[in-house]
Image: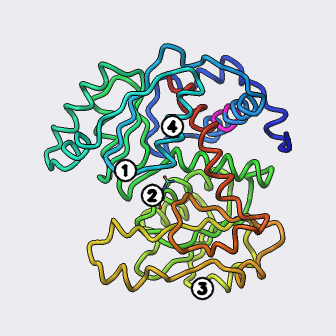
């Protein structure tokens, strides 16, 4: 077991395990530093359980509803794996029903579906192409609702597994210099992540084409908190100062104007020429799927942590599920 954080992990105290009970997780901003650390500590404990192949029953007799109105591989499968590993069960909606529910423009339809599902499950995980959909679900559900991505809004559980990955890889979260690259306008993972980075006084560098800049309200909010934010459109200029380079996919499905997508789709490619200029210990993250933002040749670089990051989705989501129910 190579990683010290995992090797030394113990189950958090009962008092800490109660902090998130019955809480929705809709947006990163709802979690304070203490709560975030409890989730990461619990994730490390579950990773240890997985490595030691111990069987746990923390979700025994509990049911998770997996409601995805938008395609998902990693998020859905890692949530479902997490539930199985915790001894719980999963219910879901068939693809044809998903299309029916998600394609209606009437808010009531989703609300009614969630009310019904709330009667069946102990926790509800929702993904939707509509910003604010998880908040709407949480309004009508009594059980905890976990936002697994709402349009170009938030993706707090991805950001949690990203923080867990950074903690494991860098052994520390305080004061890091982090470059966020690509589609900062529509990329929901970065909208959640910056809130977490602000808890640790990280220095942020946003690198994107002009059309895909981080929304102004998010940047201003960070600056109000005293966070150092720089914006650039040139990756090569800032690459040597970074501790973490977080790459995002240009979110094709969110563009109203296809020509605009075509113009920006290959704006940045992280390839060997970028790697040559990184500090030796810089790590590269990506929530995946990648299209061509990271050249395949980069995968062999020891700091290319994106597949390790995807794997961290399981213990992190085990932590989220067991803490919230
Ligand atoms: C991300 C998402 O769905 O927002 N993927 C994920 O959850 N792993 C990022 C993306 O789709 O580009």
Q: Nearer the viewer, residue 126 or 310?
A: 310
Q: Is the residue marked by circle 4 packed among few (<14), some (14-19), or many (20+) residues within 10 Å?
A: many
Q: Is residue 39 magenta?
A: yes
Judge depth for marks 2 and 4 and give the one in front. 4
Q: Is the residue marked by circle 3 packed among few (<14), some (14-19), or many (20+) residues within 10 Å?
A: some
Q: Please give the residue where the numbered disc 2 appears in the rendered image.
A: 188
Cα distance in 3D space between marks 2 and 4: 18 Å
Mark nearer the N terminus (2 vs 4): 4
Residue 253 lies, with reference to residue 61, above or below; the image says below
Q: Please give the residue where the numbered disc 4 appears in the rendered image.
A: 79
Q: Secondary structure at mark 4?
A: helix
For image coordinates 23% across by 47% down, the residue present is: 99
Q: Please give the residue where the numbered disc 3 appears in the rendered image.
A: 234
Q: Are marks 1 and 2 in contact (CB under 8 Å)?
A: yes
Q: In this picture, which residue range is highlighted in magenta?
A: 38-42
Cα distance in 3D space between marks 4 and 3: 36 Å
Cα distance in 3D space between marks 1 and 3: 29 Å
Q: Please give the residue where the numbered disc 1 appears in the rendered image.
A: 150
Q: Is label 1 within 8 A of ligand 1 (CB to nearest ligand atom)? A: no
Q: Is label 2 within 8 A of ligand 1 (CB to nearest ligand atom)? A: yes
Q: Are marks 4 and 1 in contact (CB under 8 Å)?
A: no
Mark nearer the N terminus (1 vs 2): 1
- In-image side of 5 versus 260 (left or right): right
Q: Are marks 3 and 2 in contact (CB under 8 Å)?
A: no
- In-image side of 303 versus 4 (left or right): left
Residue 127 x %, y %:
37, 45
Cα distance in 3D space between marks 4 and 1: 16 Å
Colouring scheme, one of rainbow, by chain, secondary structure, one colour:
rainbow
Q: Secondary structure at mark 2?
A: helix
Q: What is the count of numbered marks?
A: 4
Mark nearer the N terminus (1 vs 3): 1
């Amino acid at each position: 077991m190579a990683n010290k954080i995992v090797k030394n992990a113990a189950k958090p105290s009962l008092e800490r395990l109660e902090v998130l009970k019955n809480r929705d997780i809709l947006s990163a901003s709802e979690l304070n530093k203490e709560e975030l650390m409890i989730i990461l500590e619990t994730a490390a404990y579950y990773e240890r359980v997985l490595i030691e192949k111990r069987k746990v029953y923390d979700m025994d007799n509990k049911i998770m509803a997996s409601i995805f109105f938008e395609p998902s591989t990693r998020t859905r499968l890692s949530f479902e794996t997490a539930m199985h590993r915790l001894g719980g069960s999963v219910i879901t909606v068939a693809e044809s029903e998903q299309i029916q529910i998600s394609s209606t423009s009437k808010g009531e339809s989703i609300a009614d579906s969630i009310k019904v599902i709330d009667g069946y499950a102990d926790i509800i995980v929702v993904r939707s192409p509509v910003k604010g959909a998880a908040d709407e679900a949480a309004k009508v559900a009594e059980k905890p609702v976990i936002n697994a991505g709402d349009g170009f809004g938030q993706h707090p559980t991805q950001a949690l597994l990203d923080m867990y990955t950074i903690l494991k890889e860098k052994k520390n979260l305080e004061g890091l210099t982090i470059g966020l690259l690509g589609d900062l306008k529509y990329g929901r993972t970065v909208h959640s992540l910056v809130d977490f980075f602000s808890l640790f006084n990280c220095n942020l560098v946003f690198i994107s084409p002009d059309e895909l800049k981080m929304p102004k309200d998010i940047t201003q909010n960070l600056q109000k908190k005293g966070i150092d934010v720089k914006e650039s459109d040139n990756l090569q200029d800032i690459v040597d100062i970074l501790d973490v380079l977080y790459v995002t996919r240009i979110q094709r499905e969110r563009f109203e104007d296809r020509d605009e997508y075509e113009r920006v789709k290959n704006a940045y490619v992280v390839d060997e020429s970028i790697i040559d200029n990184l500090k030796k210990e810089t790590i590269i993250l990506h929530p995946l799927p990648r299209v061509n933002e990271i050249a395949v040749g980069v995968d062999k670089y020891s700091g290319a942590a994106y597949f390790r990051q995807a794997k961290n989705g399981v213990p992190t989501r085990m932590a989220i599920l067991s803490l919230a129910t």
